[in-house]
């Protein structure tokens, strides 16, 4: 877009006119992009993977992800979160973060650049990622005792590495670190109060996430979901909680602290208390397809446009058209709900 000449008294100055912000047909501003840079993972969590070996994986060259993210940012994306699979498995990750950190939003601000990891490799990478320009980090950790952790991840001996990774991220200045716990009835429903103590002792923000029907093994049923009211009841058994105001209108977590102000707990309840009305997210899968919702039945092949030789303008137009197709809401738990054909590890967390 060419600059527009604006007169200020006796001189002229070029003023950049920012492109239109991405909006869907429900007038929701799309400002958050989640980019899966691999669907490989070094864990086989029971709520995600089948545990089978020999799966086929898909990844794009980092340069192609960079080009696509740049176009998204030019269109109005303000927050980018790198996901997987496990993103720390990708070679060239630190340099990729360094290149992304150079991007500016349409208003000229620094891009809010985050990453979600299982933490297994974080101990050695926390400082390099921070130095490269990473803004924030979230660690997925579904138990605070080693035995339960190993049962869920199906990788023995990793728990202490994850805890060390969390502490390394804090020391690197990626603070406050968020720790995400997916709750499954019968697996880790006894971990809620221990996680509350962990949040207070370690100075991290713990967020409990309801189990969603996005696993490969298809073990999800409504009975495996631990709804928000049960989480709060367990927290209250430890000590009284106080609800906190949301940080943004599109925030997914309902935030709490304890009566003494020490520790923060978030509860993300997409099943029992859906937050679709304020959704600001869109996803790019590891094979370059746009997902307008986690529970979409369709992918939109953005990378296919690139492979056919599409220029930046064509890619931008494809993104804008796809955003207008974003669903009003998901239908989890309703009689007509269909599970997506792709699981979370292939979509990107």
Image (tube, helix red, strand yellow):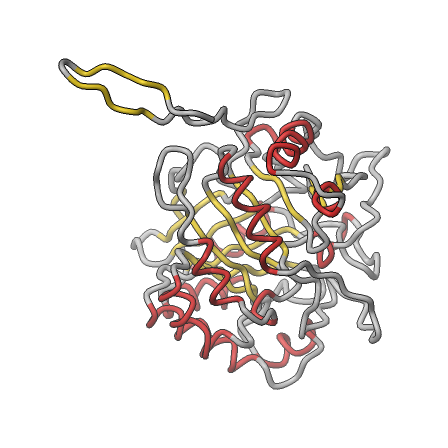
Quarter of the figure with residue 147: bottom right
Viewer-closest of 103 and 340 = 103
> Number of callouts in the render?
0
Q: Residue at x 84, y 56 (%)?
A: 218
Q: Residue furthest bottom?
A: 157
Quarter of the figure with residue 318: top right
Looking at the image, residue 167 sits to the left or right of residue 231; the answer is left
Percent of width and height locating residue 7: 23, 14
Q: Residue at x 38, y 59 (%)?
A: 133
Percent of width and height locating residue 101: 41, 54
Q: Residue at x 69, y 31 (%)?
A: 322
Looking at the image, residue 220 sits to the left or right of residue 204; the answer is right
Percent of width and height locating residue 341: 84, 48
Note whether 228 is above or below 39 in the view shown: above
Percent of width and height locating residue 337: 82, 37
Note whether 332 is above or below 42 in the view shown: above
Viewer-closest of 107 and 33 = 107
Viewer-closest of 285 and 229 = 285
Note whether 280 is above or below 98 in the view shown: above
Q: Residue furthest left?
A: 10
Q: Quadrant of the C terminus?
A: bottom right
Quarter of the figure with residue 88: bottom right
Q: Residue at x 32, y 65 (%)?
A: 173
């Amino acid at each position: 877009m060419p600059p527009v000449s604006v007169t200020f008294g006796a001189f002229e100055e070029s003023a950049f006119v920012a492109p239109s912000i991405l909006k869907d047909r429900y007038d929701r501003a799309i400002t958050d992009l989640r980019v899966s840079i691999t669907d490989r993972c070094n864990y086989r969590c029971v709520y995600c993977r089948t545990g089978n070996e020999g799966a086929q994986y898909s990844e794009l060259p980092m340069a192609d992800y960079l080009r696509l993210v740049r176009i998204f940012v030019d269109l109005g994306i303000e927050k980018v979160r790198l996901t997987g699979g496990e993103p720390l498995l990708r070679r060239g990750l630190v340099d990729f973060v360094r290149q992304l950190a150079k991007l500016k939003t349409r208003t000229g601000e620094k891009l809010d650049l985050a990453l979600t990891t299982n933490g297994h490799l974080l101990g050695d990478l926390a400082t390099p990622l921070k130095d490269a320009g990473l803004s924030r980090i979230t660690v997925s950790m579904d138990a605070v005792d080693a035995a339960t952790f190993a049962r869920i991840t199906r990788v023995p001996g990793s728990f202490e590495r994850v805890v060390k990774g969390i502490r390394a991220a804090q020391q690197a200045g990626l603070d406050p670190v968020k720790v995400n716990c997916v709750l499954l009835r019968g697996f880790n429903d006894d971990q809620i109060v221990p996680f509350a103590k962990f949040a207070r002792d370690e100075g991290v923000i713990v967020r409990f996430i309801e189990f969603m029907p996005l696993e490969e093994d298809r073990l999800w049923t409504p009975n495996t979901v631990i709804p928000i009211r049960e989480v709060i009841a367990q927290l209250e058994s430890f000590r009284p909680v106080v609800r906190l105001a949301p940080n943004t209108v599109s925030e997914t977590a309902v935030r709490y602290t304890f009566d003494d102000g020490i520790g923060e707990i978030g509860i993300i309840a997409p099943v029992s208390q859906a937050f679709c009305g304020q959704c600001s997210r869109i996803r790019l899968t590891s094979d370059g397809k746009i997902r307008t919702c986690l529970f979409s039945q369709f992918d939109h092949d953005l990378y296919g446009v690139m492979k056919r030789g599409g220029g930046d303008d064509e890619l931008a137009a494809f993104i804008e058209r796809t955003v207008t197709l974003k669903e009003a809401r998901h239908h989890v738990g309703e009689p007509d709900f269909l599970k997506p054909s792709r699981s979370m590890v292939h979509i990107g967390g």
